[in-house]
Each structure stands twice: as structure tokens, then as C-alpha cells.
Image: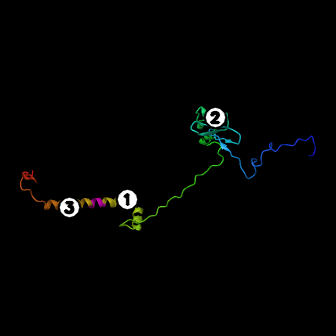
């Protein structure tokens, strides 16, 4: 001992070496359930509901507002409200753009790719003219078919004779 007047500190008064933060370890920082603020060790309040759900609050103000069932999104100073209204955002976070799927043109059964491309690049006037021509040809073919069936249709036996007009013997 150096001098008799100097008191020695008991080893219990100092914190053990395991609890002192070193450069490699980090403190367990919680987040306030109401405001979203950081809560450092030995700070804040802990509230356990009857259903065993644990809520951590930064201070009594947060706890009081929570117990009053206030919505943190409507209270201006909370982190939730600030995030909702895009306050205090220094750098803009860009959303990752997904890969756009590329369309690969292929031929269809009965038409090859060149024919499809030729039809696509056609002018609308040419396309409408071709459509009108096709409609006209279809009408002519229909009329020709109607005339052909009229010429070959059998003549009815008499004015009152219709198909199936005989007596019902089967019933």
C-alpha cells in the first residue's frame, strides 16, 4: 500500500469487463413502439399487455399517448408520421427496376413472319379497301349459293301439304 490514508476501491464497485462496450460490440438499441425513436439501454419504459405483447416506449409521453389509443400516424413528431408525409428524407431512394420482358415475334400457323410484318406495315387505306373487297366477294358467293339452292328446291305437293302433317300413329 502506498499510503495508509488512501482508500482502496472494492472490485465490486467497478463494472465487470464484459459489460463495458468495446469497439467490436454494439449496444442493443430498441425502437419505441409508438414514436419509432431509438431507446438506448436502461432508458425508456416497458409495457406488457394482458396478452403478453411487449411494448417499449421512449418516455412517458409516448406511453400516455399509446394508452389513450392515439394514432401515431396523426401525431406530427412521430417517425411514422414523418415517414408518411416524406419529411426529413435526405436522399431519394430509387426503386429497383425489374427486367422488362421482351416480345419475340414469331410466325403463326399458315403465315410466316414476313407476311405478318408486311400486313402490319400496310397503310390503313389499303387494308380497308381489301376488307371491302373481301366483304363484297363473300356477299356475291352467298347470293350465288342462294340462287343455286332455289333452282334445285323441290316443289311442294299442294297448298296445304306440309312436312309431318299426317296422323300421329306412334303416340
**Which numbered disc, 1 or 2, marks the residue that appears first in the sequence?**
2
**Which numbered disc, 2 or 3, marks the residue that appears first in the sequence?**
2
- Element at label 1: helix
58 or 14: nearer the eye? 14
Residue 5, given in percent of the width and then of the height, sits at: 92, 40
Kindly report the distance in space between the C-alpha atoms of the residues bearing marks 2 and 3.
89 Å
Please give left or right for residue 99 compared with residue 62 in the image. Answer: left
Please give left or right for residue 129 compared with residue 44 in the image. Answer: left
Image quadrant where residue 31 sits: top right
- Element at label 3: helix
Residue 134 in magenta stretch: yes
Question: Residue 145 bears which disc, if any?
Answer: 3
Residue at 67% across, 33% down: 60
Kindly report the distance in space between the C-alpha atoms of the residues bearing marks 3 and 1.
30 Å
11 or 151: nearer the eye? 11
Question: Residue 63 bears which disc, if any?
Answer: 2
- Element at label 2: helix
Residue at 21% across, 59% down: 143
Image quadrant where residue 57 sits: top right
Say if mark 2 contacts mark 3, CB within 8 Å: no
Q: Circle 1 is placed at which residue position?
A: 125
In this rendering, the answer to whether 97 lies above or below 86 is below
Dominant secondary structure of the magenta stretch? helix
92 or 28: nearer the eye? 28
Amino acid at each position: 500500500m502506498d499510503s495508509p490514508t488512501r482508500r482502496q476501491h472494492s472490485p465490486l464497485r467497478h463494472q465487470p469487463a464484459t459489460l463495458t462496450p468495446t469497439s467490436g460490440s454494439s449496444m442493443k438499441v430498441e425502437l419505441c413502439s409508438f414514436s419509432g425513436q431509438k431507446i438506448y439501454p436502461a432508458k425508456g419504459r416497458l409495457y406488457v399487455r394482458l396478452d403478453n405483447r411487449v411494448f417499449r416506449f421512449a418516455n412517458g409521453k409516448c406511453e400516455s399517448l399509446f394508452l389513450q389509443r392515439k394514432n401515431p400516424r396523426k401525431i406530427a413528431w412521430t417517425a411514422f408520421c414523418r415517414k408518411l408525409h416524406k419529411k426529413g428524407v435526405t436522399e431519394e431512394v430509387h426503386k429497383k427496376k425489374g427486367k422488362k420482358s421482351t416480345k419475340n415475334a414469331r410466325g403463326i400457323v399458315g403465315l410466316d413472319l414476313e407476311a405478318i410484318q408486311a400486313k402490319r406495315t400496310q397503310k390503313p387505306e389499303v387494308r380497308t379497301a381489301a376488307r371491302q373487297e373481301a366483304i363484297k366477294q363473300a356477299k356475291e358467293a352467298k347470293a350465288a349459293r342462294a340462287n343455286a339452292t332455289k333452282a334445285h328446291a323441290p316443289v311442294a305437293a299442294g297448298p296445304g301439304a306440309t312436312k309431318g302433317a299426317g296422323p300421329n300413329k306412334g303416340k
